[in-house]
């Protein structure tokens, strides 16, 4: 099946089967099994794991094997999960369609002519096509939520610093966050439970207790106040998406929540702000791929030519574009006007949400303005591609938890509903998403791969 | 022929950047060991190798040592202090950015605006400390050569991520000698507060200098940066060379090029390390992988309370407890080892003022001339005390003591041994001195009769002759007394 979808870049078949047999042998003593015993989990190929390559979807790391496990991988293994394989992505997580992979695009299981969204398109497609029950993605500007929406599954971006980034190959350090992809909210909650929590190896990880997410799922939304930003509804949105999202809001209202209009006036600046900050951080984060220590090396007599040719041949167009954008934004004479200004706007975006959360428990809006688009449709128009993330990027800038749940379909393609919570309040996000999901049938729809 | 009437007097302006390896067991941002001399790449991990996905975690001990320094130098310690990324490509820098601190108003380094007083010079001088900040060291390149050609280069990442502290001075130093004294003084302070081993030869203390010349009172001139100075002595030599080189350029009407120059210890010259200085843009920005360092008042107070006696306080204590002049007190506390030496000597020879006089006088002159610190000499407190006792006992004259002191400093010989081996003991035997005097009076009848005629300066002449005859060993008081007796009899 994956020959048509191309969700995986590598699969660890033999050790996965070994592990599965070992867990099977222990099934008799079910009570002693860890929470994910024997469950295969697909890992976005930007998270370091021993035993499999970690390519980041880039020629520059082709064949590189990490000598260490990311903290999330360690926690998965301890929870009994089987790391089944590494999934396709936009190179270094830079993209919204998974077309930017150096190893070819992933296709949407609902329509192989369409993209699965990105950058965690491989993980989303693998779950959507029932290849695995669970997957990890990463979300810097929407890279978990967008592919979840495009492939009709659940994808959660936790609060920044909720999940350790140790072993996550950095794209934009102040925005990157690892999140679960699953077919149901309950499964996503289970996976988050395992990976969340303080890690001494990541000094930005929060030292806060992790609540029991599964336990509070059945508690419903009675009395919950849900805000709908007036800036996120209506103009610029595909009509079916707009209708589906508003219909979903009414479902939650019927379940006992109250709907309140809120305003997020600065979110229109979120995309340009993001495209200063994320590339700036990326320009430094990706400097280490120089041919000296690991990955691709184009041999030349002098070191400067080696740097230039290794990076020239190793990186794809979008990665180069962002490195150049970021390098420019940080350069002497531009720092104040670009980087610093963008930091200030980021503070304003965060403040907008803080104000909104003064009167509501959750913010509801679309995940993306449209359903999945066709392969090649936006590949040559970076600006149009960037605007795909107009509803997800503000959430990263504010560092908040956000989930995508299936809430409709248009032309046979899934639509995603986004619920955004207060910092570290994944429990409320999951509870509302679960309530919605259990009130509707959308999550039961599966692609018919023929 | 043009006539050089008066040489234009230039003022030398020097600022130092000192990199200090901190005395921590583990690296700045990971758990790897910092021990010197391990086989290449045996003290490394994903973090200090810059592997994809690895993240830094701040070493608390390194921050504490940085704080000790900032407090000891009287810096303003900032409540929150931020790390930055300094972006540049070099193969010994695994991430191609260095995690360091940067002087940016909203993200200050650990400490700013401190000072250190320089008292050993003719007049006390307060040298401004611009900032104290923390950063990580780079790896080390090893070039494999054959027939003078580099075949390939290897990288040892053991040093990568070792905690470094950078201390930057204001351009307040006015001579190569002051620069050396300052560096010695700072080194003693860092040793005293347990921050650094101070071993320049191992690279645990490295010093770069910015040097420029100007007419007194004029704007600062164009500076060069001098690197690769591996001892206190080489700092002074390199800066003296560089100041002279710049002076010659200016005298010829040629401009000084802003460039980095390396000191060649063997040839005793600085040379340009790059043909063209590229204007580097390091694109600093706040390190997103690290949260700011929060330094509360309580932590600062704890650090302050745990500091040993600092040189300034020690100077005041010496001045009052030992009744030393401000100059002497300043001098004997100008370095920690010298202060310890002083106290140890006083333990053997309680006349503190005399000890201070010798240390501030002949010992300091020797150290200055040789470019050494007291701990780099072979002299022991016990031997110095012995020397002073020999003078008091009249066994040797002050002149003899001054003559043998350099040898004691150089070889570690004891004063008693030197006096015995060379027959330097003062002649205090009345009969022996008397017979020399008899002979001198016989040889110089003129001056002898002058003395009788009331010319007292004739006595001085005759004393001089006796001392000459005895090669300075005759006890001067005895000579005086016997001469008067014999002439008047």
Image: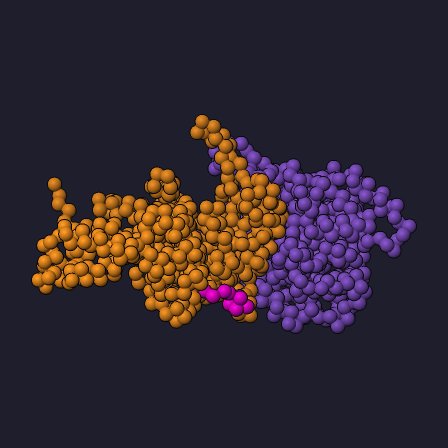
Residue reaching furthest to the left: B453
Q: Quadrant of the C terminus of chain B?
A: bottom left
**Residue B303 belongs to magenta span:** yes
The chain drawn purple is chain what?
A
**Residue B134 belongs to magenta span:** no
Name the residue at 78% across, 59% down: A437
Q: Position of residue B454 (x, y in %)?
A: 10, 64
In this orientation, does residue B131 appear? no
In this orientation, does residue A347 appear? yes
Q: Position of residue A409 (x, y in %)?
A: 74, 53
A261 left or right of B105?
right
The tint chain B carries is orange
Q: Which residues are magenta?
A: B302-310
B271 left or right of A363?
left
Task: Determine whether A289 is above or below B217 in the image.
Answer: above
In front of the other: A119 or A303: A303
Residue reaching furthest to the top: B147
Name the residue at 22% across, 62% down: B481
In front of the other: B176 or B482: B482
Q: How does the figure colour the protein chain or chains?
A: by chain
In front of the other: B394 or A435: B394
In front of the other: B315 or A382: B315
Name the residue at 87% across, 55% down: A31
Q: Position of residue A169 (x, y in %)?
A: 63, 48
Q: Quadrant of residue B313?
A: bottom left
Name the residue at 49% across, 30% down: B151
Q: Position of residue B394 (x, y in %)?
A: 32, 59
Labels in figure, total: 0
Task: Determine whether B428 is above or below A313 in the image.
Answer: below
Q: Quadrant of the N terminus of chain B?
A: top left
């Amino acid at each position: 099946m994956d020959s048509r979808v191309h969700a995986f870049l590598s699969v660890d078949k033999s050790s996965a089967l070994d592990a599965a047999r070992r867990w099977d042998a222990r099934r008799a003593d079910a009570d002693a099994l860890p929470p994910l015993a024997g469950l295969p989990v697909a890992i976005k190929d930007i998270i370091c794991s021993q035993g499999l390559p970690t390519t980041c979807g880039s020629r520059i790391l082709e064949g590189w094997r990490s000598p260490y496990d990311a903290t999330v991988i360690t926690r998965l293994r301890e929870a009994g999960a089987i790391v089944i394989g590494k999934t396709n992505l936009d190179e270094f997580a830079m993209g919204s369609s998974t077309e930017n992979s150096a190893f070819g695009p992933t296709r949407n299981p609902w329509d192989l002519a369409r993209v699965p969204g990105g950058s965690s398109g491989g993980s989303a497609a693998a779950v959507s096509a029932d290849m695995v029950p669970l997957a990890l993605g990463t979300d810097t500007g929407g890279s978990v939520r967008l592919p979840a929406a495009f492939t009709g599954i659940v994808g959660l971006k936790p609060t920044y610093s909720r999940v350790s980034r140790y072993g996550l190959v950095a794209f934009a350090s102040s925005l990157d966050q690892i999140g679960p992809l699953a077919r149901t909210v309950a499964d996503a909650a289970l996976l988050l439970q395992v990976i969340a929590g303080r890690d001494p190896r990541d000094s930005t990880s929060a030292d806060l207790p992790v609540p029991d997410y599964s336990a509070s799922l059945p508690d419903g939304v009675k009395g919950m106040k849900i805000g709908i930003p007036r800036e996120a509804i209506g103009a610029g949105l595909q009509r079916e998406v707009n209708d589906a999202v508003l219909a979903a809001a009414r479902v939650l209202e019927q379940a006992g929540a109250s709907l309140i209009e809120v305003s997020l006036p600065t979110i229109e600046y979120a995309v340009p702000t993001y495209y200063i900050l994320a590339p700036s951080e990326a320009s430094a984060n990706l400097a280490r791929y120089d041919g000296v220590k690991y990955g691709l090396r184009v041999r030349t007599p002098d070191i400067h030519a080696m740097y230039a040719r290794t990076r020239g041949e190793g990186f794809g167009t979008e990665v180069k574009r962002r490195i150049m954008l970021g390098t420019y934004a940080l350069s002497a004479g531009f720092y104040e006007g670009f980087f610093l200004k963008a930091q200030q706007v980021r503070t304003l975006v965060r403040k907008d949400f803080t104000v909104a959360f003064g009167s509501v428990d959750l913010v509801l809006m679309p995940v993306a303005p449209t359903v999945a688009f066709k392969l090649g449709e936006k590949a040559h128009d970076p600006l149009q591609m960037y605007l795909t993330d107009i509803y997800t990027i503000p959430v990263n800038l504010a560092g908040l938890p956000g989930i995508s749940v299936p809430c409709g379909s248009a032309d046979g393609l899934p639509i995603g509903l986004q619920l955004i919570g207060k910092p570290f309040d994944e429990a409320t996000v999951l509870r509302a998403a679960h309530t919605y999901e259990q009130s509707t049938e959308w999550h039961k729809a599966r692609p018919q791969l023929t | 022929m043009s006539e050089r009437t008066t040489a234009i007097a230039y003022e030398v302006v020097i600022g130092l950047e000192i990199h200090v390896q901190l005395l921590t067991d583990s690296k700045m941002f990971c758990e790897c060991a910092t021990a010197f001399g391990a086989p290449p790449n045996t003290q490394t991990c994903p973090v200090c190798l810059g592997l994809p996905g690895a993240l830094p975690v701040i070493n608390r001990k390194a921050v504490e040592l940085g704080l000790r320094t900032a407090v000891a130098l009287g810096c303003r310690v900032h409540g929150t202090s931020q790390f930055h990324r300094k972006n540049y490509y070099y193969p010994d820098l695994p991430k191609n950015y260095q995690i360091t601190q940067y002087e940016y108003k909203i993200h200050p380094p650990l400490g700013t605006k401190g000072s250190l007083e320089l008292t050993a010079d003719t007049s006390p001088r307060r040298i401004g400390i611009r900032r104290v900040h923390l950063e990580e060291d780079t790896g080390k390149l090893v070039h494999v050569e054959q027939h003078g050609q580099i075949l390939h280069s290897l990288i040892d990442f053991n040093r990568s991520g070792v905690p470094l502290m950078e201390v930057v001075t204001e351009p307040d130093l006015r001579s190569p000698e002051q620069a050396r004294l300052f560096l010695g003084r700072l080194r003693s302070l860092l040793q005293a507060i347990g921050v650094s081993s101070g071993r320049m030869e191992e690279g645990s203390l490295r010093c770069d200098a910015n040097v420029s010349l100007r007419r007194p009172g004029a704007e600062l001139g164009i500076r060069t940066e001098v690197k690769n100075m591996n001892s206190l002595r080489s700092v002074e030599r390199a800066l003296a060379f560089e100041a002279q080189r710049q002076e010659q350029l200016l005298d010829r009407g040629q401009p000084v090029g802003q460039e980095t120059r390396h000191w060649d210890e063997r040839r005793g010259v600085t040379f340009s390390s790059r043909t063209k200085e590229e204007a580097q843009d390091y694109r600093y920005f706040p390190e997103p992988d690290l949260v700011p360092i929060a330094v509360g008042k309580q932590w600062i107070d704890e650090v302050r309370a745990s500091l040993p006696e600092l040189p300034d306080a020690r100077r005041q204590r010496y001045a009052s407890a030992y009744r030393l002049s401000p100059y002497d007190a300043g001098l004997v506390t100008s370095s920690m080892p010298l202060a310890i030496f002083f106290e140890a000597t006083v333990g053997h020879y309680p006349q503190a003022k005399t000890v201070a006089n010798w240390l501030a006088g002949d010992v300091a002159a020797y150290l200055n001339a040789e470019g050494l610190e007291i701990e780099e000499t072979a002299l022991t407190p016990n031997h110095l005390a012995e020397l002073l006792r020999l003078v008091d006992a009249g066994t040797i004259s002050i002149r003899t003591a001054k003559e043998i002191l350099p040898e004691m400093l150089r070889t570690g010989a004891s004063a008693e041994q030197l006096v015995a081996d060379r027959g330097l003991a003062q002649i205090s035997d009345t009969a022996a001195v008397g017979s020399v005097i008899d002979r001198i009076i016989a040889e110089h009848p003129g001056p002898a009769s002058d003395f009788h005629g009331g010319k007292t300066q004739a006595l001085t002449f005759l004393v001089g002759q006796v001392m000459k005859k005895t090669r300075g060993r005759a006890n001067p008081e005895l000579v005086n007394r016997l001469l008067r007796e014999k002439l008047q009899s």
